[in-house]
Amino acid sequence: MRPAFVLALLLTACVDAGPRGPVEITEVDFTTIAGFHARDATVLGVPMGASREQAERIIEAHPDFVVHPDGANPGRFYVDFAQPASREEESAFYFIWEPGHKGMNRVTVFRPAAALLRGEAKALLTTAALDDAAAPAHKFLDELGERHVSLDIPAIRLRHTSHWFPRRGIEVTEQVDEAYGTRQVVFALIVRDEREH
């Protein structure tokens, strides 16, 4: 074999197609990991695909967090700070088991969780993730797959627009409350079934 061909073959084999194991989003800046997808994530030690019982056990072992069931949605629960700075800063995550999925397939990351994230991952909870094409968080998200209005209540001038980034398995939702003049961003790690793509 020619040396140039062997070198090219070796370099191709060394290209990182993704993480080599689970990625704990509160321990590393996952926006710097080539090939990162939501299916690779763990949140406070809970892997995507975990059963509800497994997730509750793991979260309950964390002294800084508590499980807060969503009474209106039995397939979901909030992960709250045990000692929140304020009522508005209580929930960090929202774990979801959607019907038809065997394990947890969605985790919404709320703004108070920014204190737990590393590096540019924090910027996914800012408007720069959607607005600033030069921002590292925007570049990490890559190509937009779809955009849709996920909540629209004209009477109170509240509108949520969700932006789906399939290469990362991340949905960034812009929450605009015109009555209060606020614009916030949250994101979700989502593992979709093949039929959902």
Image (tube, rainbow, N blue to C red):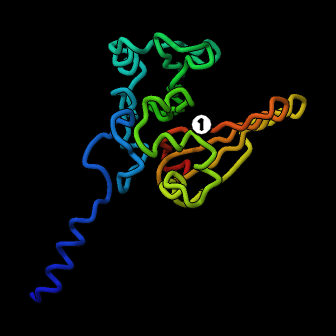
Quarter of the rendering containing residue 5? bottom left
Count how many numbered circles sit on residues in the image.
1
Residue 46, position in %: x, y?
A: 36, 27
Q: Residue furthest bottom?
A: 2
Asked if residue 23 is positioned above or below residue 53 in the image, the reply reads below
The residue under label 1 is: 186
Identify which residue, 159 or 53, lies in the foreground. Answer: 159
Element under disc 1: strand
Q: Residue at x 50, y 44 (%)?
A: 192
Packing grade of label 1 (10 A; few <14, some 14-19, many >=20) is many
77 on left or right of 36: right
Q: Residue at x 37, y 26 (%)?
A: 44
Quarter of the rendering containing residue 153? top right
Identify which residue, 91 or 47, lies in the foreground. Answer: 91
Identify which residue, 167 or 53, lies in the foreground. Answer: 167
Residue 40, position in %: x, y?
A: 36, 43
Residue 140, position in %: x, y?
A: 47, 55
Residue 74, position in %: x, y?
A: 57, 17
Q: Residue at x 46, y 11 (%)?
A: 82
Q: Residue furthest right?
A: 155
55 on left or right of 91: left
Q: Amino acid at mark 1?
A: Val
Q: Quadrant where the N terminus lies? A: bottom left
